[in-house]
Image: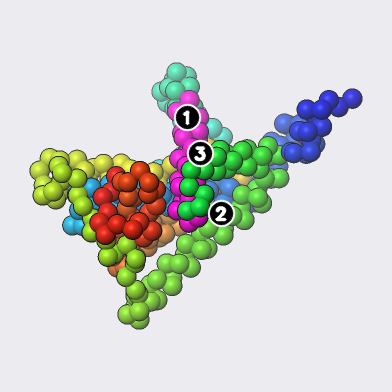
Amino acid sequence: MLTFLDALKRILVGRPFRTERAKVQPLPQRLALPVFSANALSSVAYSPDEILLTLALAGVSAVALSPLVGLAVMVVLLVIIASYRQSVHAYPSGGDYQIASENLGKTAGITVGSALMFDYVLTVAVSMSSAAHYLIAAFPALHGGQTTAAALGVVILAFLHLRGLRRGGRAVAIPTYAFVALILLMCAVGFAQDLAGQLEMAPSAALDIVPDAEFEAGLTGLAGALLVLRAFSTGAAALTGVETPAGNVKAFQPPRARNAATALLALGIAATVMTMAVLYLRRRRGSTWCRCRRSSCGSMAPRCRRTTCRCR
């Protein structure tokens, strides 16, 4: 006889199924690609933003370096993807855990596995907090509800995955494909307008960036070098989730290793194109995403009523 909690769980997530059944349900490539690439592709939404916000601490001249910093991040991303493409053929069943265990010992394997678990948790936390921030920026009337929106997003993701990869695959694949399509469409329209000489300046281009006191002279000395390195490290958020396809080779349809390597290549190309296109268009439009320091104004720069913008 079902208890109240069992009945509620069945209503929310459906009937339970045996774990053994889930292990023999490989995903087709059209679903595996977005499911295992969603973490890395979602970082395109906030990785360029973090690079810009960090460099803006030193003023407009520093922001001009954002494409170079983004390019450095993408080079590291492609190197990591090339490495994982080799590993999926050599270690198709265990991912990072198997690689570390067989080459460095069981302790190293456990350490790597634990690090991956923390990475997954932090990826969800960062992605949802960024999504909540942009939701509030788009709808200022919801200001103050960032925490609730982020927590609700985590709950929705959990429900989507409780029925397994195949059952939740379509629910993840559709928004992932939609996100990539919209970013590429935005970039294509921007490039077309740029080539036609019709690309307008962004609303935030009229705002003056007020650098922090320690960077009033711009990117000079050791402090300037450290700021560029900090921008690189914050922009390296684009690397989060890259290991997911390599760690889930068994979930791909045969030939599993080749399909996982193809997914990694597609992930690297898509992330690089979208990130660099966003940074290029930002530079062409003269926009700088800054947050107003006033406690009463949590908006992004285009909605801030101040004529100057001091970035955090």
Name the spot of residue 146 as percent of width and height, x first. Answer: 49, 43
Q: Is residue 129 magenta?
A: yes
As for residue 27 lying within the magenta part, the answer is: no
The secondary structure that dominates the magenta segment is: helix
Asked if residue 198 is positioned above or below residue 128 in the image, the reply reads below
Q: Position of residue 90 (x, y in %)?
A: 49, 38
Name the residue located 32 percent from the left edge and 46 percent from the top edge: 294
Report the residue marked by disc 1: 118
Reading the chain from its start, which is encountered first: label 1 or label 3?
A: 1
Question: Circle 1 — which element?
Answer: helix
- Name the mark nearer the viewer: 3 or 2: 3
Residue most toward the right? 1
In the rendered view of the protein, which quadrant contains the C terminus?
Answer: top left
Q: Position of residue 267 (x, y in %)?
A: 47, 52
Q: Amino acid at mark 1?
A: Phe
- Magenta-drawn segment: 114-139
Residue 209 visible (yes or no): yes
Residue sitting nearer the eye, 252 or 111: 111
The residue that appears at 67% across and 45% down in the rendered structure is: 168
The residue that label 2 is drawn on is: 176
In the displayed structure, 205 sits above or below 80; it is below
- CA gap between label 3 and label 2 equals 23 Å
- Mark 1 or mark 2: name the one nearer the start of the chain: 1
Give the secondary structure at mark 3: helix
Residue under the image location 49 percent in, 37 percent down: 125
- Circle 3: residue type: Thr
Residue furthest toward the bottom? Answer: 196
**Residue at horizontal 47 percent and vertical 19 percent from the top:** 106
Say whether marks 1 and 3 touch (CB < 8 Å). Answer: no
- Circles 1, 2 touching at the beta carbon (< 8 Å): no
The residue carrying mark 3 is 147
Badge 3 local density, few (<14 within 10 Å), some, or many (20+)? few
